[in-house]
Image: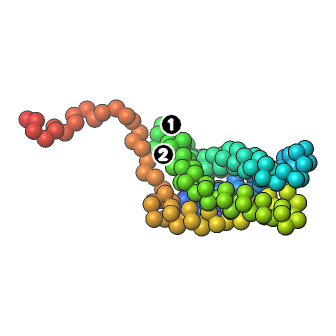
């Protein structure tokens, strides 16, 4: 059963990209909650905007690092299939593949931070502790941007499995003649 779920996760990009981004987002929130709390105690709860911006930086760094690991597991790691020599050449380039998704997420960053920082700032003003305002606002921003990014990814083809790059970059032995050549 676990093998089937893992294969499903690896074979369908709409599933793995969304699970990776949501997983990275919520793991980053869980990892960043304590540093956000410690920072708010250190600078004082009255500095709500400074705490909100620091929370965004802490969360962003953790999120990106976690996402790259999850993306590699979903799209480039093949523990359930036998690896053959030279098999790595048939998979799309990891950095290019992961960076396309990150670029699209970057384009949604203004909306994400408007909801997350603005929401956290507002929730703190309504009396919620900084660490819990962080959790609620950033989780809301993740859900909202996941919906928009999924729609965008379906329209642009990001959620389709990328074509494998050629196994060799060497030119063919007898390339076809170019137009105009005899």
**Secondary structure at numbered mark 1:** loop
Q: Position of residue 26 (x, y in %)?
A: 74, 57
Q: Marks 1/2: CA distance?
A: 16 Å
Residue 37 visible in this rendered orientation of the protein: no
Quarter the C terminus occupies: top left
Horizontal and vertical percent for residue 91? Answer: 49, 45
Measuring from the top left, give residue 3's x and y in whole percent.
65, 59
Figure quadrant of residue 179:
top left
Q: Residue furthest front?
A: 46
Residue 71: percent from left, percent from top:
61, 50
Residue 139 to residue 86: above or below: below
**Residue behind mark 1:** 85
- In the image, 141 versus 40, the foreground residue is 40
Residue shown at 78% from the left, 59% from the top = 121
The relative height of residue 67 versus residue 150 in the rendered view (above or below) is above
Task: Point out the frontmost of discs 1 and 2.
Answer: 2
Quick one: quadrant of the N terminus?
A: bottom right
């Amino acid at each position: 059963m676990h093998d089937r779920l893992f294969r499903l996760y690896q074979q369908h990009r709409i599933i793995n990209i969304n699970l990776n981004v949501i997983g990275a987002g919520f793991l980053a929130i869980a990892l960043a909650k304590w540093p956000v709390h410690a920072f708010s105690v250190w600078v004082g709860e009255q500095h709500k905007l400074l705490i909100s911006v620091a929370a965004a930086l802490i969360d962003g760094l953790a999120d990106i690092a976690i996402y790259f690991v999850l993306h590699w597991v979903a799209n480039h790691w093949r523990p359930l299939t036998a690896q053959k020599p030279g098999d790595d050449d048939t998979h799309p380039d990891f950095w290019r593949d992961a960076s396309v998704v990150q670029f699209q997420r970057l384009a949604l960053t203004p909306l994400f931070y408007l909801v997350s920082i603005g929401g956290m700032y507002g929730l703190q003003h309504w009396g919620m502790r900084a660490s819990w305002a962080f959790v609620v606002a950033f989780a809301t921003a993740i859900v909202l941007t996941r919906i928009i990014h999924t729609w965008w990814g379906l329209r642009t083809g990001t959620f389709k499995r990328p074509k494998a790059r050629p196994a060799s970059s060497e030119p063919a032995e007898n390339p076809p003649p170019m137009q105009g050549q005899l």
